[in-house]
Amino acid sequence: MNLAVYDLSGKQVGTYEIDPAELAPSVNKQLLHDAVVMYQANLRQGTHRTKSRGEVAGSTKKLYRQKGTGNARAGGRRSGTRRGGGHIFAKRPRDFGFRMPRKSLQAATRMALAARLADDEVRLVDSLALAAPKTATVYGLLGALGVTEHTVLVAPEKHDDNLWKSARNIEGVSVSPVGDLNAWAILRPRKIVMTTAAIDAFRASVKAKVKSPESRPSSARKASKPVAKAAAARKTTRGE
């Protein structure tokens, strides 16, 4: 697929050819879901806390006798079934965070960007270099690209202080270098604006991380040698 490349004024200056299958041959929705759940769970503070019946104020005396009143059986006023009583399953501070395998998260990041490319939700610019912080310049670019009505992720090749200062006051716009992207950061906004250098860096990292199929048989043969030696040793000890 060919993507249009724009300059800072919003004028098309070229095209960029990329195949989403180069980043990820297929998109595993379950893996993307698991990755997003992990990132959201790690953002939770987990500081919630409620009182149990042993912590709320009130008497522990039985309200009235067990039988003979015609009412339902009742204990103390701290009971969780009564207003002002403690929570039956009181909440306690806890850590909701968990980790997924590193390679799974890397694959999820590639799948997320491949999916956004396939859905035509990525806009490319040749450069986002600014001489000084200027919010009007960035806002004008987003308007020319037609993404001002959506949440936008701006992804340069590396951190640019002028770009970050120019975009931080625009509602719904976030700036993140391409090296800091993950599946949640890519899937959260409706549109993505990347530089050609940033997507080149992403493609280079994919080629570096994904092993070529030719190297797998040799590694498998190397791994099988210790197994064969161990089997031969067991036969020797058994007298076979």
Image: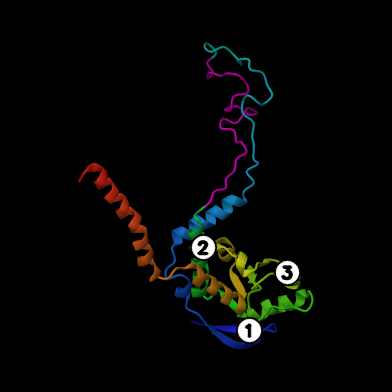
Q: Determine the CA span between mark 1 and mark 3.
A: 19 Å
Residue 177 placed where, x, y %? 64, 68
Q: Is residue 162 above or below residue 68?
A: below
Residue visible at 23% across and 42% down? 238
Image-based side of 154 in relation to 219, left or right: right
What secondary structure do most residues of the magenta stretch adopt? loop
Q: Which picture quadrant has residue 189? A: bottom right
| Amino acid on which disc 2 is placed | Gln
Tell whether 160 sits left or right of 17: right
Secondary structure at badge 2 equals helix
Numbered-mark total: 3
* Looking at the image, residue 141 lies above or below residue 213: below
Mark earlier in primary sequence (1, 3): 1
Which mark is first along the chain, 3 or 2? 2
Q: Secondary structure at mark 1?
A: strand
Disc assigned to residue 106: 2
Residue type at mark 3 is Trp
Magenta region, residue range: 70-99
Q: Amino acid at mark 1?
A: Tyr
Q: 177 or 173: which is nearer to us?
A: 177
Q: Which residue is mark 3?
A: 164
Q: Which residue is mark 1?
A: 6
Measured as percent of width and height from the top left, residue 71 is found at 54, 18
Confirm whether the magenta stretch covers residue 169.
Answer: no
Question: Real-space Cα distance between discs 2 and 3?
Answer: 25 Å
